[in-house]
Amino acid sequence: MHKYLPHTEGDIKQMLDAIGVGSLDELFEKIPKKLQYQGKYDVPNQLSDLEVTKLLNEIAANNKTLTIFRGYGAYDVYTPSIIKALTSRQEFITSYTPYQPEVSQGTLQYIFEYQSMICEITGMDVTNASMYDGPTATAEAILMAISHTGKKKIVYSSLIHPRTIEVVKTYGHYRDLDFVPLPEKDGLTDFSKLAELSKDSAAVLVQSPNVYGNIEHLNGISDTIHAEGSLFIMNTEITSLALFNTPGNLGADIACGDLQSLGVPLSFGGAYIGFLAAKTPLLRKMPGRICGITTDQDGKRAFVLTLQAREQHIRRAKANSNICSNQSLMALSVAIYLSSMGKEGFIDLARLSLDGAYYLEAELVKTGLFTKSNNQTHYKEFVLESKIDPKDFDTYLIEKGYLGPQYLGDGKYLFAVTEKRTKDEIDQFVKVVGEFK
Amino acid sequence: MRYYDTLIFEITKQGRVGHNLPKNQFPSVKLDASLLREQKAELPEVSELEVVRHYTNVSLKNFGIESGFYPLGSCTMKYNPKLNDELAGLPGFANVHPLQPNEVSQGFLEIYFDLARYLSELTGMDAYSLNTYAGAHGELAGLMIIKKYHELRNDSKRKLIIVPDSAHGTNPASATVCGFDVIEIKSHPDGTVNIDALKEVLNANVAGLMLTNPNTAGVFEKDIVEISKLVHEAGGLVYYDGANLNALLGVSRPGDMGFDITHLNLHKTFSTPHGGGGPGSGPVGVKAFLKEFLPGPVVEKTTSGFKFHQPETSIGALSAFYGNASVYLRAYVYIRTLGIENLKMIGKLATLNANYIKESLKDYYKLPIEGHAMHEFVFDGLIDQSTGVKTLDIAKRLLDYGMHAPTIYFPLIFSQSMMIEPTEAESKETLDKFIDALKSIAKEAIDDPENLKSAPHNTVVRRLDEAKAARNPIVAYKDIHKFI
């Protein structure tokens, strides 16, 4: 047999006898013969572990490993070793959604800790046990808003990451939502017509730092939005909240975004994790799993999934969301990461990215190839303008071992610096960029 | 398992650090105070050993597949091979940025291309998109395909999705999120589709039908070809919920039964870890005529290598990048390690295991459906219900025996459902132990029913006051002072 299949021929015979059939095929009598596949599957035969390992190493070698100065929604971050060591404990990785809380207190506890940390960082009151990624979390935020307000118009900043808005619009298309953009001005969202545009809207959606990496000026906008009976949804880069004003403090009703920056490896775009947090009045509109605290019959403190009545398995066709499983193991990873960074380390981490990005920006401008496109405060990412050819530049940098900036069109190049980029790496990169002809 | 009643916030001490970040060698940028946060986030301050010890202790309060038998019906809790995890973590995969040009991410594109091809072969579909994150997300994509297909044919009145009452709860929820109205049709007592009930609701407003096969009671829809034909004749599409594919793997293919669209749960059928509730993975597959509707990008093979391709009439983007790549790696390794000769045995052995348990216990537990089941089956509580012992009590008592409980109170078509799914990965000896445990519990129900009704007794916590958690929701540590 195979190492994953424990049945001996003797076992199979004994079990068939116990069932009272003569062969395995007899178990499938209910499947009409013509539906029992007799063709040849075009799938290869088994490989030994050594052969699979060799094969996967060969395939991995066809992915070039580069020094990364690109972000645009995925960041080259530091992952402490303890994350892999702890998240690969079988009690975590091989367990299921905690339907039997008495034997799932581990999962439930880390979810509670994860929720607590996300609420702390965002300044929000409640959050769920995680979402797939930032864009889908944003789409769920929109679904919450339309369910809460009963309206179908969504106002959004045109400086939201295009992929996020694409995902939001995909969900919105199938719900007949109207999308109205807010224009940009000097690298920031132009809120001058906010009151007018947000009339009769379900939500106003803003991203800060925005797609250029710039911190939006959001003080006071919640008053204008709330005056229209609309909800304020803020999409944000989680590590920026170590330094910058929180959605909670800015009057947001819902905060959302991606948590990949919190130690989750790049891994070609997944598995990542999104977050969705809200103010207390929206608690019962939250999709997904939420963990709460309670006691057991002996009075011991314990954790349990709560407010399940909002969910698809009770409400079925009345559900606001179809989210079922989340990214639980990634939530654990985030909880471990944030525990390791701690109160001060989280700020140091953000400072490394922020200061590093400003340094790279200044050095790149010195090469004469790039000019600043605005003077806004930015975090981790920034835009420079240039007349160089984007394709040639990209190819040149890859040959030198770098993944360079994301080209945004119109001569705009988006660079990223994470806590992983050292000053030496940045200096070397700038030198290589300077030699581009 | 042991009780560890400490939260990470309760071991924090000002000044402790659990990380070793590089020194900041850059000039410190001065920031405009009006943009800054006022108070620091109250994250824990703990040393590395404290973090490690804390989460190790937290883990010990959990039951995983390696702890013991986990017969959770419809969740397909099979063994998660270590080799898969090890190879998915190779630096050549973990350090690849999703926006690296195709030319320098050929390894990943090859995995995507081949995995989609293998999934197509095993399910009889023509193409897959791997851009969805979970089963429910795949369902949503499938429904969007149905909606867009009708839209592009200017058939905009098709607003109804038919779902049997035995369906997974995500089916009606996904249809609603996609803007459809749901019609639920009553099933036969064995959970199969009632064709007369189906015929009654089929009309020119029907967009499609959602179905899992075998159904949630573990019964194969023997009339599936007829069902597909009826829906197609009415102008609708037929959607396959792949939650129960494990039963059919290597035996029969949904693509040959008339299904137009499928989603698969790689975390069920292809051994990728459930991770306590994710990350899962739910690729969506279609017949050739729907290929251009898939969520993009998908990978194609050209003479100069693999590259991403955006389907022409794609339903749109559903993920930040391309789904859970690290999960695909695990599924790919699983398929290559087993090979087709062993994959062909999966459905057979899973079905053998399920029927073996069913036959061994049917004198003790009420079997509402006669005949051979597929990879899972349902008992409707104890045969002798005079003692008042309910399915919940049986489930809780099993925990004391060191086994996970089956799925309980689902499917909704029986009042005392216990849905048992052993998977092919379990040996006869393990099944025998489980059978013995359930026989003992049946005996206990007569000898000492109170002991069952107060179970579990050997777990770290006992039955929880769920109502209290909902009445006074405390979902973050900052509100713990409200905990009474």
Image: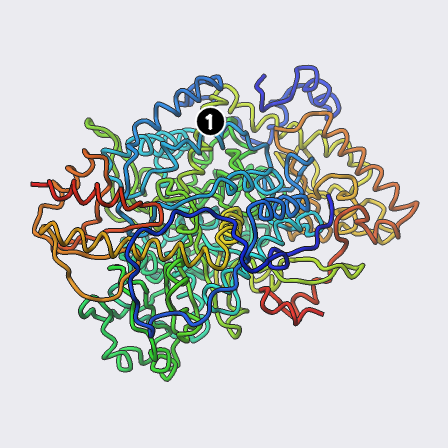
Residue placed under numbered mark 1 in the picture: B335
Residue B323 versus residue A11 in the image, above or below = below
Color style of the picture: rainbow
Dot 1 falls on a residue whose secondary structure is: helix
Q: Nearer the viewer, residue B163 or A330?
A: A330
Look at 66% across and 72% down and name the residue there. Answer: B482
Q: Amino acid at mark 1?
A: Ile
- Residue A402, picture quadrant: top left
Q: Is residue B233 visible?
A: no
Residue B82 in the figure: left or right of residue B422: left
Q: Residue at x 50, y 22 (%)?
A: B338
Q: Is residue B114 left or right of residue A322?
A: left
Q: Where's residue B428, x and y in %?
A: 71, 25
Please state if A244 lies on the left or on the right of B341 as rendered: left
Q: Residue at x 33, y 78 (%)?
A: A221
The image quadrant of residue B78 is top right
Q: Is residue B155 left or right of residue B400?
A: left
Q: Quadrant of the C terminus of chain A?
A: top left
Does the rendering let one see residue B125? Answer: yes
Residue A126: give x, y in percent of width and height.
53, 67
Q: Give x and y (percent) for residue B32.
A: 30, 71
Q: How many marks?
A: 1
Q: Most extreme residue toward the right, as rendered?
A: B447
The quadrant of the picture occupied by the N terminus of chain A is top right
| Extreme residue in the bottom direction | A227
Q: Position of residue B298 (x, y in %)?
A: 30, 40
Q: Residue at x 32, y 74 (%)?
A: A218
Above or below residue A113? Residue B266 is above
Q: Report crowding for label 1: few under 14, some 14 to 19, many 20 or more residues within 10 A (C-alpha).
A: many
